[in-house]
Every structure is written in structure tokens, then in C-alpha cells.
Image: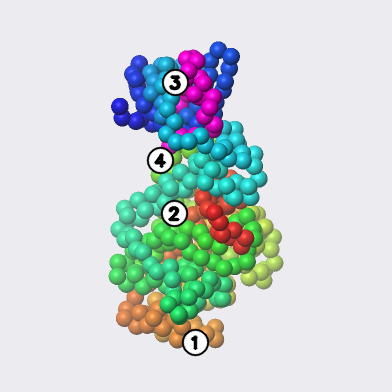
Amino acid sequence: MQRILSSQLTHQVGESVRIAGWVHRRRLLKSVAFLIVRDAAGLAQVVVTDPAVRAAVESLPEETVVEVVGTVVANATAPAGVELAEPAVRPLGPPAVPPPFDLYRPALTATLPTQLDHAPAALRHPTRSAALRISAAAVAGFRAALDAHGFVEIHTPKVVASSTESGANVFALDWFGRPAYLAQSPQFYKQLMVGVFERVYEVGPVFRAEPHDTVRHLAQYTSLDVELGFVADHRDVMAVLRETLAGMLAEVAARAGGALATLGLTLPEVPAEIPAVHFTEALKIAGAPADEPDLAPAHERALGEWALREHGSDFLFVTGYPMAKRPFYTHPDPARPTHSNGFDLLFRGMELVTGGQRLHRHEDYLAALAARGEPVEPYAGYVDAFRHGMPPHGGFAIGLERFVARLTGAANVREVTAFPRDLHRLTP
């Protein structure tokens, strides 16, 4: 008899079936026992009346892996309206050692550090696994949306020879006796690949050795990177980002409906045109000083509230960030050279995406590096490619964990990360 998942039981009423999974909970009443079995698809209720089977169930702690063969009967009070009767229960391994928290409760009561210390068990809880299902669906939607627009997925090195893009906050390692670093971003490589495919994207880890100990930062996270050629300016990039986000949320709705229900979530709408404000206007809205060089988290929250109040939007573009706060490869605004053709996308009052138009002329790169007092040599392999002809281009990067945290309302990005790596945590 082939094993089926709990989600298939509603189509098997009256039939004998075989399921397998983990003992999620046992309820041992006087005349009957209930065994709740958890598998990848959800929960199944097993009704036990036979004394011998009951004795076997009593000896199986929560999280023991079992196989159950029984007859599917309708019961409106059971999960999904069906349950297994007259079961035979067989353990598929030794009795489990229960984790230090109850996985059958609606919410995990353990502190977040305890959950992270015991992540392999904590991730089994339906609320924790639901967030990861949403994450997987979002990545599938990211890929599908870009594939539909002619983008090519690429895979770039995560070990690099120089720490050039974001300063000194990098992880150093030994590479066969030579110094090397974990990549902070695929930025340079995805730009170079525009010269090959015109439109590219990547899903991969990035590493930031920044000493941030906050609810929104990780030392390793998953970056969803996009770069496209032959743009007029940053607004073409923003339009692609809007379509990408819509595709991601559509795929979450299609693939992760059960996870959304588990967490009680309603997905936000992506407006046909996401509202946008220039950085100088954003400072006024947020009540920040006019000479502020960047937006603080409090400013982002104020802007998020404004976008929701004035436009009914969970999303807001802030464009025209000062060039002094953007990487050297950022294209300046031709009309306001002190400001950039760069943008951030705020999602519910938090920066989610950074993007913009890049420089594409070799001489502009030489001038940009000289203006910042930086030598060309560390960037030679990157800058040299622009001698061979590159189109006007731009791109963006979405932090996956931050996206899922904002989507689910998680207070800490670590709640939606399977095995977070940060200032303090390198295990499990």
C-alpha cells in the first residue's frame, strides 16, 4: 500500500490507507485515545479504541516517527473533516526524545534564543515551517516573473580576491595561502553579465561582516539580485521591480495558501503604480532635517505610515538619494548631479530593496573612483569590462528574509530564517 499525505485523506473516505509522519500529539482519554500525526502536508487524526494499539500509542513520545494504516472516515470535528479508524500503528524508529518545548501548542512559548539553539526541532512547528514555505514560494515567484521577461539565471562566485564593494566589513579567509573574502554582493558580476545576456538574476547568499545586532540584520542572508540592460534610467528598473514583486506575491498565494492560513495572513496588494517620492520630499514627510544624508529607521516608519494613509499602499519608492550615500558605480541624476538615479523601496515602513541605474561608460568609472580618492587597481577586472561596450543598465536586490519577515509580521528576521548567522550565532 502506497503512502499518502494527510492532505489527500479527504479523497479517500471509506478506503484503507497508509500514512506516516511524526507523533504531533497524543490525547489519552478513558475510553478512547487520539493520535495526531504530522507530515509535510499537515495533520491527521487517528482514533484508537483497541487496548493493544492504545498501549503502543502510550509508549510513543511526541516526535516519534510512525506509520499508520487505517480506514478513512468522515468526522466534521477532525482536521480536514476526516480521521483514521481501526488503525495499526508501527514506529519507524526508536522513541524520540521530546524537544524542550511543545510543538503541538498553537504557538511556540520558548524564547527565540532557545528556538534557535534547537532549530532542527523548532522549525517543525507549523508557524515556523509556514514562514519557510512562504519564503520558498516567494523565490519561485521571483524566478517565474523574471523568466517570463527574458531574464537568465546566473551563478556568481561567493569567494572573491578583494574586498572592494562595500568597504572593510568583509569576512576574510585563506585561499590556498592567499587572502580571499566572502562576497558581500554579486553586484559587479551581475553587471558584467549584462554584457552577455542583457537581463540576468541570481538567488544566492551574501555575507556582511557588519557588527549589527538588530532585529533586521543578518551576517549571511539570501539576496534576490536583478540587473537589466538598455534602460532609459532608474524608472525602467523600478517598473521591473514592481512586476517582480507582484509575481512573488502571486506565487505565494498560489503555492503557500495553507501557510498563509496557518499564520492568519492576508497578502498586500502591489499597486499598478507604486507611489514614489524624491529623497528631498521624503525628508519633509518624515520630519527630518533637510541636510540629512540618509533615512533612519524612524524616518522609514513615518514614510510607510504616510504611504498607507495617502495612497493605501504598503509599498513606497524613495528616489534620488544623495550620491555621497550611494556606491561609486551609481549613475547621477543628470538634472541634479548631487543626487542619484538610485532608489530604495520601503515595504511597510522598512527598506526592502535598494536599486538604481549604474554607470556604463569606462571613463565615468575612472572619474567616479578618482573623485572618491580610490585607486583603480583593486577594481581593474571589473572596470576594464566597460572598455568593451556596455549598455545603460541598472538593477536591484531584495533581501529575502527581510521580505518574508515584513510579509508575516515577524518581529525579528531570525524568526523566518532556518539557521541564522549573525554577530553571535554560528551554530547549529
The residue identified by callout 3 is: 83
Dot 1 alpha-carbon crowd within 10 angstroms: few under 14, some 14 to 19, many 20 or more: few
Name the N-terminal-most of marks 3 and 4: 3
Front residue of 83 and 164? 83
Q: Amino acid at mark 3?
A: Glu
Name the N-terminal-most of marks 2 and 4: 2
| Disc sitting over residue 375 in the figure | 1
Q: Which stretch did the figure color magenta?
A: 39-66
Q: CA distance from mark 2 to mark 4?
A: 20 Å
Dot 4 alpha-carbon crowd within 10 angstroms: few under 14, some 14 to 19, many 20 or more: some
Q: CA distance from mark 2 to mark 1?
A: 36 Å
Q: CA distance from mark 1 to mark 4?
A: 49 Å
Q: x and y percent of residue 318 in the render?
A: 55, 61
The residue identified by callout 4 is: 255
Question: Please, is residue 358 above or below residue 10 in the view?
Answer: below
Question: Please, is residue 210 above or below residue 346 in the view?
Answer: below
